[in-house]
Image (cartoon, helix red, strand yellow):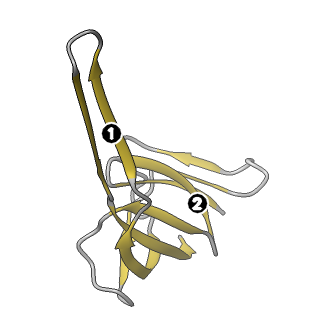
Amino acid sequence: MLAVVELGGNQFIVKKGDVIEVKKQDVEEGANMSVEAFLVADEEGKDVKVWTPTVKGSKVEFKVLEQSKGDKVRVFKMKSKKRYAKNTGFRPSITKLEVLSIA
């Protein structure tokens, strides 16, 4: 089974056993969470369920593996001929999720 879910403002195509990194979710490590799917299909694409905005009765179960910080993102600003240059960066907070089941 394949499913399309939205987490943290981004959409992900997931199947059972996948591990994905999303923007920080407010869930404890080791806890389970569930989300409704936009699209649910089988592997061959013969049985496809699409609904607006989500498929009623669909449920994608996730297990929270880790809450951590991502790689550093460098932000460099410069104005030519004005002697202005600014170099900053940040590390986004991420949540690592494992797909347990798709129904």
Give the residue at x 29% y 68%. 25
Q: Quadrant of residue 2?
A: bottom right
| Image side of residue 97 versus residue 9, left or right | right
Dot 1 or dot 2, earlier in sequence: 2
Query: In the rendered image of this protein, does residue 55 appear above or below residue 67?
Result: above
| Image side of residue 26 versus residue 70, left or right | left
Q: Quadrant of residue 68?
A: bottom left
Give the residue at x 42% y 80%. 66
Under mark 2, the amino acid is Val
Question: Which quadrant: the N terminus?
Answer: bottom right
> Which residue was labeled with disc 1?
75
The count of marks equals: 2
Residue 47 spot, x, y in % from top left: 68, 51
How packed mark 1 is, by other alpha carbons closer than 10 Å (few <14, some 14-19, many 20 or more), is: few
How packed mark 2 is, by other alpha carbons closer than 10 Å (few <14, some 14-19, many 20 or more), is: some
| Residue at the far bottom in the pictured view | 30
| Residue at the far right in the pictured view | 44
| Image side of residue 90 versus residue 55, left or right | left
**Which numbered disc covers residue 4?**
none
Relative depth, front residue between 37 and 51: 37
At mark 2, the secondary structure is strand
Report the Cα–Cα distance between label 1 and label 2: 31 Å
> Which residue was labeled with disc 2?
14
Give the residue at x 45% y 47%. 11
